[in-house]
Every structure is written in C-alpha cells, then in structure tokens.
Image (cartoon, grey):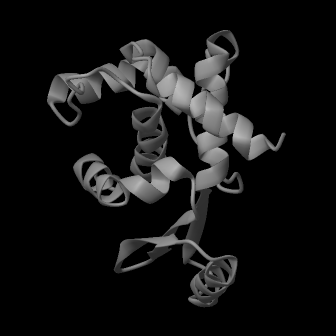
Amino acid sequence: MSLSVDIQRSLCYAASMTYTDAAIAAAAGIDYSTFRGWLHRGALRRPRGGWTPEDAILLRCVWVLAVLGIDLRAAIDLCEARRAAITAGRGWLVYLRDPGVEPAVLLVTRPEDLVAVTSHGLLRGPQAGVVTIDLGRSREVVLRALREPQRAAGAIEPQPRREVIA
C-alpha cells in the first residue's frame, strides 16, 4: 500500500473528528499562546463544526507566511483563497521578497514552474529572498502530528529556519 493511500485513509478518518485548540496549534507547529492570541484578537474564528485536519494544514501555511513578515490577516486571506490546493498538499507556496517591492506569494503546482520561479527569484539580486513551502510535506507533518500528539508537543519550532522547507 502506498504512503499516499495511507495518508488519504488517515485524513478521511481524521476528518470525522474535531480537535481542540491546543491540538490544532501543536499540529500546525504554532505556539499555543500565539494561537490563542490570534483567536482573542479575532484574526481567527473557531469553525462551527470544530477544528479539522484541513484547518491545521492551512494554519501551518498561515503561520509560516506570518513569520516571514506578511500581515496575519493578509496571510489568512491568501491561504483561504488557495485552500483546496493547500489542504490537498498539491504543489508549493513560494514567497518572493525583493527590497523596496511588496512581497509576492505564488502557488505553483508543477515542478518545472517551481524551478523557473525560484531561479527567477534568485536572479533578482543578493538582497532578494525566496522561501518555498512544500505543501505535500506540510500536509504529512500535520497529519502525523494529529495521529501522534505526544510527539507533536515537542516539535514546535519557534522560528522556521530559512533553508527548511515547511
């Protein structure tokens, strides 16, 4: 049985469950106090049916973009607009930063497009920055954290390292 079939089955099983704020924050890799602050300020709202694995997958991308300097509300809106691709784990989110220019976030689904976008971003100059979020890998990390919550509690990174693909 392939890994993707196992992940699909675990996602279907997990979709029938709802999770607590603490479980979702831990699975997404967000410090719980930060997550509570987002809820308290009204940047996030608890879904009526409760938190699902898809919400944790989306919040992981929101968190990485927020740490990179994108306004929290803008990061949430950006990820919500791309919810289907992010929660399915198809493709990559690419964050491009150039001094003096508004940062750009692109959703890329083909490997050749990823190579083109990242090489273009790296050619912009030494001050430019490119961060790639592998959506498939992010999805796997979140699902594993929801299945094994005791391991997720110690795996929260306070800041993502630049060279790490989330």
> Residue 44 appears at what percent x and percent y?
23, 33
Q: Residue 158 vs residue 62: left or right?
A: right
Q: Is residue 157 visible?
A: no
Q: Is residue 166 above or below residue 132?
A: above
Residue 104: name its quadrant. Answer: bottom left
User: Quick one: which residue is furthest to the top in this view?
Assistant: 150
The count of marks equals 0
Residue visible at 66% across and 9% down?
150
Q: Residue 123 vs residue 98: left or right?
A: right
Q: Is residue 133 above or below residue 30?
A: below
Residue visible at 47% across and 31% down?
53
> Residue 165 appears at what percent x and percent y?
67, 54
Q: Residue 87 vs residue 55: left or right?
A: right
Q: Is residue 77 above or below residue 18?
A: below
> Residue 84 appears at what percent x and percent y?
41, 55
Residue visible at 30% across and 52% down?
80
> Residue 108 appears at what percent x and percent y?
53, 73
Q: Quadrant of the N terminus?
A: top right
Residue 48: name its quadrant. Answer: top left
Residue 81: name its quadrant. Answer: bottom left
